[in-house]
């Protein structure tokens, strides 16, 4: 997993698609998601506040922005193993990018890897809420 964004958001989405293509079934893909979530950096307890909580997720998710319009960084964590894996993918695509790129980038990797069909409705809603909050932070940085 890239910890520093050296490619574009589009390239990051392509790399995610290529990684998921290696797995034959969704049991392996879910395990990979869980493994990705375990690689998230530690998340300070003091950030687990209502201000940073993503509403619309069944599990608890916190998303903390930093930086400015030139380069935005995000830290996030969840109490769910699979959601933490989803966070890892989202951060690969959207963190450490200019705010305009964040706003302009659609999360095509979700459909490309078949995630949309394999998430429960509550996880899909939570993922959409997380992406909306992340893009709102980027839009706010542009304002």
Image (spheres, rainbow, N blue to C red):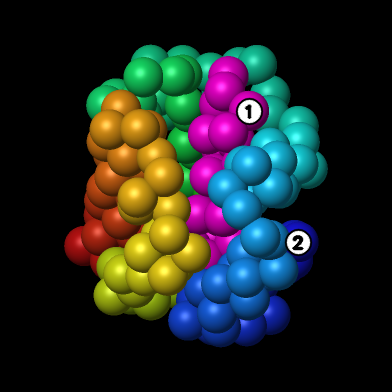
The numbered dot on residue 81 is 1
Which secondary structure, mark 1? helix
Q: Is residue 84 above or below residue 109?
A: above
For image coordinates 68% across by 61% down, the residue present is: 23
Q: Are marks 1 and 2 in contact (CB under 8 Å)?
A: no
Q: How many marks?
A: 2
For image coordinates 30% across by 28% down, the residue present is: 122
The numbered dot on residue 1 is 2
- In the image, residue 54 lies at what x, y percent? 36, 29
Of residues 99 and 56, the one drawn nearer to the viewer in this rendering: 56
Q: Is residue 38 above or below residue 8?
A: above
Residue extending furthest left? 143
Tell us which disc is closer to us: 1 or 2. 1
Earlier sequence position, callout 1 versus callout 2? 2
Q: Is residue 101 visible?
A: yes
Q: Quadrant of the N terminus?
A: bottom right
Q: Quadrant of the C terminus?
A: bottom left
Rendered image quadrant of residue 51: top left
Q: Is residue 132 above or below residue 84?
A: below
For image coordinates 69% across by 47% down, the residue present is: 28
Which secondary structure, mark 2? loop
- In the image, residue 141 lies at what x, y percent? 33, 59
Q: Which residues are magenta?
A: 76-96
Query: For this view, does 55 lie left or right of residue 87?
Result: left
- In the image, residue 113 lies at what x, y percent? 48, 64
Q: Is residue 134 visible?
A: no
What crowding class fits label 1: few (fewer than 14 Cα within 10 Å), some (14-19), or many (20 or more)? some
Residue extending furthest front? 24
Rendered image quadrant of residue 4: bottom right
Q: Main secondary structure of the magenta part?
A: helix
């Amino acid at each position: 997993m890239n910890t520093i964004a050296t490619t574009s958001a589009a390239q990051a989405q392509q790399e995610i698609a290529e990684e998921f293509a290696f797995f034959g079934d969704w049991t392996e893909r879910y395990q990979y998601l869980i493994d990705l979530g375990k690689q998230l950096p530690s998340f300070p307890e003091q950030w687990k506040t209502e201000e940073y909580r993503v509403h619309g997720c069944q599990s608890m998710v916190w998303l903390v922005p930093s930086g400015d319009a030139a380069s935005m960084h995000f830290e996030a964590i969840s109490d769910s193993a699979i959601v933490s894996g989803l966070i890892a993918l989202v951060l690969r695509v959207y963190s450490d990018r200019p705010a305009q790129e964040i706003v302009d980038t659609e999360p095509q990797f979700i459909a490309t890897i078949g995630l949309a069909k394999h998430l429960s409705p509550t996880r899909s809603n939570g993922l959409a809420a997380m992406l909306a909050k992340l893009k709102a932070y980027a839009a706010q940085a542009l304002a």
